[in-house]
Image (cartoon, grey):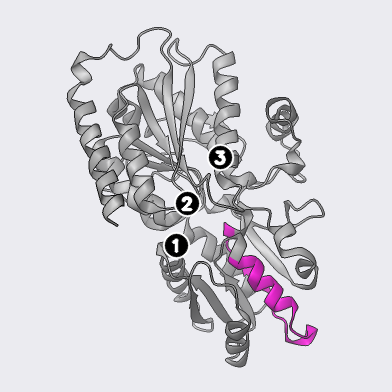
Amino acid sequence: MNDMSSLTRRRLLGALCGSAALAALPVRGQAGNPIRIGLSAEFGMQGSHAAQSIEKGILLAIDEINAGGGVLGRPLALEKRDDRGVPARGVDNLTEFAAMSDLVAVFCGRFSPVAIEQAPVANRLGVLLLDPWAAADGIVQQPAPNYVFRVSANDSWAMQTLLDHARRRQYRKLALLLPNTAWGRSSEAAALAHARSDAGLRLASYWYNWGDSDFAPRLQQLRSEGARALIMVANESEGAHVVRAMAALPPEQRIPIISHWGIAGGDFANTAGKALEAVDLVVVQTFSFSGNSNPRAKAVAAALPKRFGHDVAALRGQVGFAHAYDLTYLLAGALRKAGNTGRAAVRDALESIDSHDGLVRNYRKPFGPNDHEGLDRAQMFLARFDAEGNLRAIPR
Protein backbone atom coordinates (compact mmCIF):
# COMPACT_ATOMS: atom_id res chain seq x y z
CA MET A 1 0.00 0.00 0.00
CA ASN A 2 2.85 2.41 0.79
CA ASP A 3 4.48 1.76 -2.61
CA MET A 4 1.19 2.43 -4.42
CA SER A 5 0.66 5.65 -2.45
CA SER A 6 4.15 6.85 -3.35
CA LEU A 7 3.56 6.10 -7.02
CA THR A 8 0.27 7.96 -6.95
CA ARG A 9 1.87 11.01 -5.29
CA ARG A 10 4.65 11.13 -7.89
CA ARG A 11 2.20 10.95 -10.79
CA LEU A 12 -0.11 13.54 -9.30
CA LEU A 13 2.88 15.87 -8.85
CA GLY A 14 3.83 15.20 -12.47
CA ALA A 15 0.32 16.08 -13.58
CA LEU A 16 0.42 19.39 -11.69
CA CYS A 17 3.82 20.24 -13.12
CA GLY A 18 2.57 19.35 -16.60
CA SER A 19 -0.43 21.66 -16.18
CA ALA A 20 1.77 24.51 -14.97
CA ALA A 21 4.04 24.11 -17.99
CA LEU A 22 1.30 24.31 -20.64
CA ALA A 23 2.01 27.97 -21.39
CA ALA A 24 5.54 27.06 -22.47
CA LEU A 25 4.40 24.35 -24.90
CA PRO A 26 3.56 24.79 -28.61
CA VAL A 27 0.01 25.91 -29.36
CA ARG A 28 -2.40 23.05 -30.01
CA GLY A 29 -3.39 22.62 -33.61
CA GLN A 30 0.12 23.05 -34.98
CA ALA A 31 0.07 21.28 -38.36
CA GLY A 32 1.61 17.82 -38.39
CA ASN A 33 1.65 17.18 -34.63
CA PRO A 34 -0.49 14.13 -33.82
CA ILE A 35 -3.66 14.50 -31.79
CA ARG A 36 -3.21 11.83 -29.15
CA ILE A 37 -5.82 9.51 -27.68
CA GLY A 38 -5.14 7.52 -24.51
CA LEU A 39 -6.21 3.99 -23.63
CA SER A 40 -6.00 2.63 -20.08
CA ALA A 41 -7.12 -1.00 -19.98
CA GLU A 42 -6.39 -4.41 -18.52
CA PHE A 43 -3.75 -5.61 -21.01
CA GLY A 44 -1.86 -7.58 -18.36
CA MET A 45 -4.85 -9.61 -17.15
CA GLN A 46 -4.45 -13.25 -18.10
CA GLY A 47 -7.30 -14.67 -20.17
CA SER A 48 -8.90 -11.32 -21.00
CA HIS A 49 -9.08 -10.23 -24.64
CA ALA A 50 -11.17 -7.11 -24.08
CA ALA A 51 -8.33 -4.57 -23.87
CA GLN A 52 -6.78 -5.91 -27.04
CA SER A 53 -10.15 -5.83 -28.79
CA ILE A 54 -10.80 -2.23 -27.72
CA GLU A 55 -7.30 -1.28 -28.91
CA LYS A 56 -7.90 -2.86 -32.31
CA GLY A 57 -11.17 -0.99 -32.73
CA ILE A 58 -9.46 2.32 -32.01
CA LEU A 59 -6.47 1.53 -34.24
CA LEU A 60 -8.55 0.51 -37.26
CA ALA A 61 -10.69 3.66 -36.95
CA ILE A 62 -7.54 5.78 -36.62
CA ASP A 63 -6.05 4.15 -39.74
CA GLU A 64 -9.18 4.95 -41.74
CA ILE A 65 -9.45 8.51 -40.43
CA ASN A 66 -5.76 9.22 -41.05
CA ALA A 67 -6.00 7.75 -44.57
CA GLY A 68 -8.72 10.33 -45.21
CA GLY A 69 -6.51 13.23 -44.14
CA GLY A 70 -6.77 13.00 -40.36
CA VAL A 71 -8.61 15.60 -38.30
CA LEU A 72 -8.00 19.34 -38.50
CA GLY A 73 -5.04 18.59 -40.77
CA ARG A 74 -3.40 16.38 -38.12
CA PRO A 75 -3.15 12.60 -37.70
CA LEU A 76 -4.61 10.77 -34.73
CA ALA A 77 -2.28 8.61 -32.62
CA LEU A 78 -2.90 6.17 -29.77
CA GLU A 79 -1.05 5.96 -26.44
CA LYS A 80 -1.83 2.95 -24.25
CA ARG A 81 -1.18 1.97 -20.64
CA ASP A 82 -1.86 -1.26 -18.75
CA ASP A 83 -4.01 -0.87 -15.64
CA ARG A 84 -4.31 -4.66 -15.04
CA GLY A 85 -7.92 -4.13 -13.98
CA VAL A 86 -6.78 -2.34 -10.80
CA PRO A 87 -8.67 0.92 -10.03
CA ALA A 88 -5.63 2.70 -8.53
CA ARG A 89 -3.59 1.95 -11.65
CA GLY A 90 -6.42 3.17 -13.83
CA VAL A 91 -6.54 6.47 -11.95
CA ASP A 92 -2.75 6.83 -12.16
CA ASN A 93 -2.85 6.21 -15.92
CA LEU A 94 -5.65 8.73 -16.39
CA THR A 95 -3.74 11.34 -14.38
CA GLU A 96 -0.63 10.76 -16.49
CA PHE A 97 -2.62 11.09 -19.70
CA ALA A 98 -4.32 14.29 -18.51
CA ALA A 99 -0.92 15.95 -18.17
CA MET A 100 -0.20 15.43 -21.89
CA SER A 101 -1.10 18.71 -23.58
CA ASP A 102 -1.71 17.18 -27.02
CA LEU A 103 -3.95 14.41 -25.70
CA VAL A 104 -7.67 15.05 -26.07
CA ALA A 105 -9.41 11.95 -24.65
CA VAL A 106 -8.85 8.68 -22.76
CA PHE A 107 -10.60 5.37 -23.39
CA CYS A 108 -11.19 3.12 -20.39
CA GLY A 109 -11.31 -0.68 -20.41
CA ARG A 110 -13.92 -3.28 -19.56
CA PHE A 111 -14.01 -3.21 -15.76
CA SER A 112 -16.63 -1.08 -14.04
CA PRO A 113 -14.71 -0.88 -10.72
CA VAL A 114 -11.87 0.84 -12.60
CA ALA A 115 -14.08 3.16 -14.65
CA ILE A 116 -16.14 4.10 -11.57
CA GLU A 117 -12.95 5.43 -9.95
CA GLN A 118 -11.65 7.08 -13.12
CA ALA A 119 -14.85 8.96 -13.98
CA PRO A 120 -14.84 11.64 -11.22
CA VAL A 121 -11.10 12.15 -11.72
CA ALA A 122 -11.64 12.73 -15.46
CA ASN A 123 -14.35 15.24 -14.61
CA ARG A 124 -12.13 17.04 -12.13
CA LEU A 125 -9.17 17.18 -14.52
CA GLY A 126 -11.31 18.17 -17.50
CA VAL A 127 -10.20 15.31 -19.76
CA LEU A 128 -12.66 13.24 -21.78
CA LEU A 129 -13.18 9.66 -20.57
CA LEU A 130 -14.69 7.49 -23.32
CA ASP A 131 -16.23 4.19 -22.19
CA PRO A 132 -16.49 1.39 -24.79
CA TRP A 133 -17.38 -1.46 -22.40
CA ALA A 134 -17.74 -0.88 -18.63
CA ALA A 135 -21.46 -1.06 -17.86
CA ALA A 136 -22.10 0.20 -14.32
CA ASP A 137 -24.83 2.82 -14.48
CA GLY A 138 -23.01 5.38 -12.35
CA ILE A 139 -19.98 5.74 -14.64
CA VAL A 140 -21.57 8.38 -16.87
CA GLN A 141 -23.62 9.99 -14.10
CA GLN A 142 -21.19 12.79 -13.32
CA PRO A 143 -21.91 16.44 -12.44
CA ALA A 144 -21.90 19.08 -15.16
CA PRO A 145 -19.83 19.73 -17.12
CA ASN A 146 -19.73 15.96 -17.58
CA TYR A 147 -16.60 14.71 -19.38
CA VAL A 148 -17.63 11.02 -19.43
CA PHE A 149 -19.29 9.53 -22.53
CA ARG A 150 -20.23 5.92 -23.19
CA VAL A 151 -20.95 3.79 -26.25
CA SER A 152 -21.83 0.52 -24.56
CA ALA A 153 -24.57 -1.23 -22.65
CA ASN A 154 -25.35 -0.17 -19.12
CA ASP A 155 -26.48 -2.44 -16.33
CA SER A 156 -30.05 -1.16 -16.37
CA TRP A 157 -30.59 -2.12 -20.01
CA ALA A 158 -28.66 -5.37 -19.68
CA MET A 159 -30.54 -6.59 -16.62
CA GLN A 160 -33.90 -5.59 -18.07
CA THR A 161 -33.08 -7.60 -21.20
CA LEU A 162 -32.09 -10.64 -19.12
CA LEU A 163 -35.19 -10.45 -16.94
CA ASP A 164 -37.49 -9.94 -19.93
CA HIS A 165 -36.03 -13.11 -21.46
CA ALA A 166 -36.70 -15.00 -18.22
CA ARG A 167 -40.26 -13.67 -18.18
CA ARG A 168 -40.90 -14.77 -21.78
CA ARG A 169 -39.74 -18.26 -20.83
CA GLN A 170 -42.00 -18.13 -17.75
CA TYR A 171 -39.22 -18.36 -15.17
CA ARG A 172 -40.70 -16.54 -12.20
CA LYS A 173 -38.18 -17.33 -9.45
CA LEU A 174 -34.66 -16.28 -10.37
CA ALA A 175 -31.27 -16.41 -8.70
CA LEU A 176 -28.91 -13.45 -9.20
CA LEU A 177 -25.27 -14.58 -9.06
CA LEU A 178 -23.24 -11.43 -8.47
CA PRO A 179 -19.60 -10.43 -7.90
CA ASN A 180 -18.92 -8.46 -4.74
CA THR A 181 -17.83 -5.39 -6.75
CA ALA A 182 -19.28 -2.10 -8.01
CA TRP A 183 -20.42 -3.97 -11.11
CA GLY A 184 -22.27 -6.58 -9.06
CA ARG A 185 -23.95 -3.96 -6.88
CA SER A 186 -24.96 -1.91 -9.94
CA SER A 187 -26.42 -5.02 -11.59
CA GLU A 188 -28.37 -6.02 -8.48
CA ALA A 189 -29.82 -2.52 -8.12
CA ALA A 190 -30.86 -2.51 -11.79
CA ALA A 191 -32.47 -5.96 -11.54
CA LEU A 192 -34.39 -5.13 -8.36
CA ALA A 193 -35.61 -1.83 -9.83
CA HIS A 194 -36.91 -3.59 -12.93
CA ALA A 195 -38.51 -6.40 -10.90
CA ARG A 196 -40.63 -3.91 -8.94
CA SER A 197 -42.89 -3.56 -11.98
CA ASP A 198 -43.70 -7.29 -11.88
CA ALA A 199 -45.09 -8.47 -8.55
CA GLY A 200 -44.86 -12.11 -9.60
CA LEU A 201 -41.13 -12.01 -10.28
CA ARG A 202 -39.02 -13.19 -7.33
CA LEU A 203 -35.29 -12.53 -7.13
CA ALA A 204 -32.71 -13.82 -4.66
CA SER A 205 -29.10 -12.58 -4.65
CA TYR A 206 -26.06 -14.83 -4.20
CA TRP A 207 -22.65 -13.19 -3.94
CA TYR A 208 -19.14 -14.35 -4.77
CA ASN A 209 -15.64 -12.85 -4.90
CA TRP A 210 -13.41 -12.48 -7.93
CA GLY A 211 -11.13 -15.50 -8.09
CA ASP A 212 -13.68 -17.94 -6.65
CA SER A 213 -13.65 -21.29 -8.41
CA ASP A 214 -15.98 -23.63 -6.50
CA PHE A 215 -19.56 -22.75 -7.37
CA ALA A 216 -21.12 -26.16 -6.73
CA PRO A 217 -22.32 -25.24 -3.19
CA ARG A 218 -23.95 -22.03 -4.45
CA LEU A 219 -25.71 -23.88 -7.26
CA GLN A 220 -26.97 -26.48 -4.80
CA GLN A 221 -28.21 -23.72 -2.49
CA LEU A 222 -30.02 -21.66 -5.09
CA ARG A 223 -31.60 -24.76 -6.60
CA SER A 224 -32.75 -25.97 -3.17
CA GLU A 225 -34.31 -22.54 -2.63
CA GLY A 226 -36.38 -22.90 -5.78
CA ALA A 227 -34.55 -20.94 -8.50
CA ARG A 228 -35.83 -21.77 -11.97
CA ALA A 229 -33.07 -19.91 -13.82
CA LEU A 230 -29.78 -18.23 -13.03
CA ILE A 231 -29.08 -14.59 -13.92
CA MET A 232 -25.28 -14.58 -14.00
CA VAL A 233 -23.08 -11.49 -13.70
CA ALA A 234 -19.55 -12.76 -14.24
CA ASN A 235 -16.37 -12.49 -16.26
CA GLU A 236 -14.95 -15.37 -18.25
CA SER A 237 -12.95 -17.05 -15.48
CA GLU A 238 -15.68 -17.29 -12.83
CA GLY A 239 -18.33 -17.76 -15.52
CA ALA A 240 -16.54 -20.84 -16.88
CA HIS A 241 -16.42 -22.33 -13.38
CA VAL A 242 -20.17 -21.76 -13.04
CA VAL A 243 -20.86 -23.45 -16.39
CA ARG A 244 -18.70 -26.45 -15.48
CA ALA A 245 -20.42 -26.75 -12.09
CA MET A 246 -23.83 -26.61 -13.78
CA ALA A 247 -22.83 -29.19 -16.40
CA ALA A 248 -21.64 -31.54 -13.63
CA LEU A 249 -25.18 -31.75 -12.24
CA PRO A 250 -27.54 -34.48 -13.47
CA PRO A 251 -29.42 -33.18 -16.56
CA GLU A 252 -32.73 -32.92 -14.72
CA GLN A 253 -31.15 -30.65 -12.08
CA ARG A 254 -29.58 -28.13 -14.46
CA ILE A 255 -31.23 -24.73 -14.86
CA PRO A 256 -30.77 -22.18 -17.67
CA ILE A 257 -28.10 -19.49 -17.34
CA ILE A 258 -29.00 -16.01 -18.60
CA SER A 259 -25.77 -14.06 -18.56
CA HIS A 260 -24.54 -10.48 -18.50
CA TRP A 261 -21.77 -9.93 -21.03
CA GLY A 262 -18.64 -10.08 -18.90
CA ILE A 263 -17.99 -13.62 -20.11
CA ALA A 264 -17.58 -12.26 -23.65
CA GLY A 265 -14.34 -10.51 -22.69
CA GLY A 266 -12.19 -13.63 -23.15
CA ASP A 267 -12.16 -16.91 -25.05
CA PHE A 268 -15.09 -18.19 -23.04
CA ALA A 269 -16.12 -21.09 -25.26
CA ASN A 270 -12.60 -22.55 -25.12
CA THR A 271 -12.30 -21.90 -21.37
CA ALA A 272 -15.63 -23.55 -20.57
CA GLY A 273 -14.88 -26.46 -22.92
CA LYS A 274 -17.33 -29.31 -23.45
CA ALA A 275 -19.37 -28.20 -20.44
CA LEU A 276 -20.81 -25.38 -22.55
CA GLU A 277 -22.58 -27.92 -24.76
CA ALA A 278 -24.42 -29.33 -21.73
CA VAL A 279 -25.77 -26.00 -20.46
CA ASP A 280 -28.54 -23.72 -21.73
CA LEU A 281 -26.67 -20.39 -21.85
CA VAL A 282 -27.60 -17.07 -23.45
CA VAL A 283 -25.62 -13.82 -23.22
CA VAL A 284 -26.69 -10.19 -23.66
CA GLN A 285 -24.83 -8.30 -26.40
CA THR A 286 -25.00 -5.14 -28.51
CA PHE A 287 -22.94 -6.27 -31.50
CA SER A 288 -21.53 -9.33 -33.23
CA PHE A 289 -19.91 -9.90 -36.61
CA SER A 290 -21.44 -13.41 -36.71
CA GLY A 291 -24.37 -13.40 -39.12
CA ASN A 292 -24.09 -9.62 -39.53
CA SER A 293 -25.15 -8.48 -43.02
CA ASN A 294 -24.55 -4.76 -42.46
CA PRO A 295 -22.31 -3.46 -45.31
CA ARG A 296 -20.08 -1.56 -42.91
CA ALA A 297 -19.64 -4.62 -40.72
CA LYS A 298 -18.66 -6.63 -43.78
CA ALA A 299 -16.16 -3.98 -44.89
CA VAL A 300 -14.58 -3.82 -41.43
CA ALA A 301 -14.43 -7.62 -41.20
CA ALA A 302 -12.62 -7.67 -44.56
CA ALA A 303 -10.08 -5.12 -43.28
CA LEU A 304 -9.15 -7.07 -40.14
CA PRO A 305 -6.78 -9.64 -41.72
CA LYS A 306 -4.78 -6.94 -43.51
CA ARG A 307 -4.40 -4.83 -40.35
CA PHE A 308 -4.08 -7.46 -37.61
CA GLY A 309 -3.20 -10.73 -39.32
CA HIS A 310 -6.32 -12.68 -38.36
CA ASP A 311 -9.88 -12.91 -39.58
CA VAL A 312 -12.97 -11.81 -37.70
CA ALA A 313 -13.70 -15.33 -36.40
CA ALA A 314 -10.59 -15.06 -34.20
CA LEU A 315 -11.63 -11.70 -32.73
CA ARG A 316 -12.78 -12.11 -29.14
CA GLY A 317 -14.59 -9.35 -27.26
CA GLN A 318 -16.24 -8.11 -30.43
CA VAL A 319 -18.49 -5.64 -28.60
CA GLY A 320 -15.42 -3.82 -27.29
CA PHE A 321 -13.97 -3.59 -30.78
CA ALA A 322 -17.19 -2.23 -32.29
CA HIS A 323 -17.88 0.26 -29.49
CA ALA A 324 -14.31 1.58 -29.55
CA TYR A 325 -14.35 1.84 -33.35
CA ASP A 326 -17.55 3.88 -33.28
CA LEU A 327 -16.42 6.03 -30.35
CA THR A 328 -13.22 6.94 -32.20
CA TYR A 329 -15.25 8.16 -35.16
CA LEU A 330 -17.58 10.10 -32.87
CA LEU A 331 -14.56 11.74 -31.23
CA ALA A 332 -13.16 12.66 -34.66
CA GLY A 333 -16.52 14.19 -35.58
CA ALA A 334 -16.53 16.22 -32.38
CA LEU A 335 -13.00 17.48 -33.09
CA ARG A 336 -14.09 18.66 -36.53
CA LYS A 337 -17.21 20.27 -35.10
CA ALA A 338 -15.21 22.04 -32.38
CA GLY A 339 -12.60 23.21 -34.89
CA ASN A 340 -9.83 22.80 -32.31
CA THR A 341 -8.50 20.31 -29.77
CA GLY A 342 -9.43 22.16 -26.60
CA ARG A 343 -10.89 19.55 -24.30
CA ALA A 344 -13.82 21.67 -23.16
CA ALA A 345 -14.69 22.57 -26.76
CA VAL A 346 -14.56 18.91 -27.83
CA ARG A 347 -16.70 17.92 -24.84
CA ASP A 348 -19.32 20.48 -25.89
CA ALA A 349 -19.13 19.28 -29.50
CA LEU A 350 -19.73 15.66 -28.47
CA GLU A 351 -23.01 16.75 -26.89
CA SER A 352 -24.15 18.25 -30.21
CA ILE A 353 -22.95 15.73 -32.84
CA ASP A 354 -25.63 15.40 -35.50
CA SER A 355 -25.10 11.92 -36.97
CA HIS A 356 -22.73 9.10 -37.77
CA ASP A 357 -23.36 5.75 -39.45
CA GLY A 358 -21.44 3.31 -37.28
CA LEU A 359 -20.91 -0.40 -36.78
CA VAL A 360 -23.32 -0.77 -33.86
CA ARG A 361 -26.00 1.66 -34.99
CA ASN A 362 -26.76 4.73 -37.05
CA TYR A 363 -26.16 7.48 -34.51
CA ARG A 364 -28.57 10.42 -34.64
CA LYS A 365 -27.70 13.01 -31.99
CA PRO A 366 -26.14 10.25 -29.85
CA PHE A 367 -25.32 12.53 -26.91
CA GLY A 368 -26.94 15.52 -25.27
CA PRO A 369 -26.35 17.73 -22.23
CA ASN A 370 -28.31 15.33 -20.04
CA ASP A 371 -27.58 12.07 -21.88
CA HIS A 372 -24.07 10.73 -22.36
CA GLU A 373 -25.19 7.23 -23.41
CA GLY A 374 -24.51 6.70 -27.12
CA LEU A 375 -26.65 3.56 -27.29
CA ASP A 376 -30.09 2.74 -25.96
CA ARG A 377 -31.93 -0.42 -25.01
CA ALA A 378 -32.92 -1.05 -28.64
CA GLN A 379 -29.34 -2.26 -29.29
CA MET A 380 -29.59 -5.03 -26.66
CA PHE A 381 -30.07 -8.60 -27.89
CA LEU A 382 -29.40 -12.12 -26.66
CA ALA A 383 -26.90 -14.46 -28.26
CA ARG A 384 -25.42 -17.95 -28.02
CA PHE A 385 -21.88 -19.10 -28.65
CA ASP A 386 -21.41 -20.58 -32.11
CA ALA A 387 -18.99 -23.28 -33.25
CA GLU A 388 -16.19 -20.73 -33.66
CA GLY A 389 -16.56 -19.45 -30.10
CA ASN A 390 -18.25 -16.20 -31.10
CA LEU A 391 -21.70 -14.96 -30.15
CA ARG A 392 -24.54 -15.11 -32.66
CA ALA A 393 -27.87 -13.38 -32.09
CA ILE A 394 -30.90 -15.53 -31.37
CA PRO A 395 -34.44 -14.56 -32.46
CA ARG A 396 -36.02 -11.95 -30.22
Q: Earlier in the sequence, mark 1 or mark 2?
A: 2
User: How many numbered marks does the figure carry?
Assistant: 3
Residue 214 image point, x, y percent: 60, 77
- Using the image, tell me which numbered label, if any, was put on residue 395: none
- Residue at the image position 50 percent from the left and 47 percent from the top: 42
Rendering coords of residue 161 (x, y %): 57, 63
Label of residue 54 in the image? 3
Disc 1 vs disc 2: Cβ atoms closer than 8 Å?
A: yes
**Label pair 3/2, CB-CB below 8 angstroms:** no
Marks 1/2: CA–CA distance: 9 Å
For marks 3 and 2 on the same chain, the one whose residue lies earlier in the sequence: 3
| Residue at mark 2 | 134
Magenta segment range? 238-262
The quarter holding residue 380 reads bottom right
Identify the secondary structure beneath mark 1.
helix
Residue drawn at the location 40% of the way across and 7% of the way down: 31
Looking at this view, name the residue that lies furthest to the front: 3
Quarter of the image where the N terminus is located: bottom left
